[in-house]
Amino acid sequence: MPALVSLLPSQTALALSVAVRFLEGNLPDAQARLDHVLSASRQRDALADCGALAPLYALLLCARDSEAGQAAAKRVLNAGTSELARGALRSLRILLRHLTEPPEEQRRLDVHQLSADIAGWELLILALTVHLHSPDKWARANWCQELLRRARGWHLAGYHWFARQARPSCSRRRCARPRSSCFGI
């Protein structure tokens, strides 16, 4: 993958290199490269639409645990014009609200209220919110079931990394089973 990224135009390569470093497990370098992407966008007065990688970048920015990181995460998602970006932004706002509200003011997130065509990133961010903030074991169990159901489709469609986020026991590092045995296929 890194060899292919180096063949792209410099700004595109820089943006994709954030994801490459993240996938390699090099979080400090991914964060540093993300800073370069953001600073380059300030020079052009507009942040480029990062497409399907925007939610990943937004989560990396939120991981900085600062107001500046949260504001930058919203900027990254606002730059996108697709339904994927809008859905990820909706779910990110819910996550950020849950991070700042007292537990008694947080609205319960029920998986059965989701649209059947909810995008993967929106689903994963909402599931993360439930995982982090819901004390209800049944709500978490329902979200887990939904993630596992969706992960099979993601796996079959070739989105293996995405599917592993929903079923972490199937990551290459932790699971000795061949990928074809995951998700009952």
Image: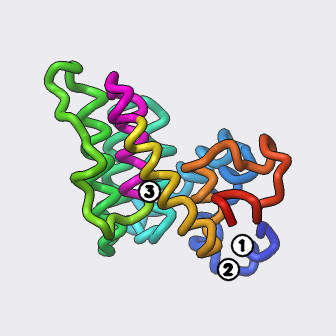
**Front position in the image: 29 or 98:** 98
Q: Amino acid at mark 1?
A: Val
Q: Amino acid at mark 3?
A: Pro
Mark nearer the viewer, 3 or 1 = 3
Residue span colored magenta: 121-140
- Work out how far the residue at label 2 is from the one at label 3, CA to CA, in angstroms: 21 Å
Q: Residue at x 75, y 60 (%)?
A: 181
Specify few, some or many for label 1: CA neighbours under 10 Å numbering under 14, 14-19, or 20 or more: some
Q: Tag 2, which secondary structure? A: loop
- Establish if 8 lies above or below 32: below
Q: Residue at x 74, y 80 (%)?
A: 7
Question: Could you tell me if the residues under marks 3 and 1 are in contact, i.e. CB atoms within 8 Å?
Answer: no
> Most extreme residue toward the left, as rendered?
105
Predominant SS of the magenta segment: helix
Q: Let me know if residue 124 is in the magenta part.
A: yes
- Report the disc number at residue 55: 3
- Report the disc number at residue 151: none
- Work out how far the residue at label 3 is from the one at label 1, CA to CA, in angstroms: 20 Å
- Establish if 68 lies above or below 78: above
Q: Residue at x 47, y 52 (%)?
A: 147
Q: Counting residues from the N terminus, which is met first, the one under dot 3 or under dot 1? A: 1
Question: Is residue 119 rendered to the left or right of residue 57?
Answer: left
- Work out how far the residue at label 1 is from the one at label 2, CA to CA, in angstroms: 6 Å
- Report the disc number at residue 8: 2
Percent position of residue 22, x then y: 66, 50
Q: Let me know if residue 20 is in the magenta part.
A: no
Question: Could you tell me if the residues under marks 1 and 2 are in contact, i.e. CB atoms within 8 Å?
Answer: yes
According to the image, label 1 marks what residue? 5
Q: Residue at x 46, y 43 (%)?
A: 144
Q: Tag 1, which secondary structure? A: helix
Q: Amino acid at mark 2?
A: Leu
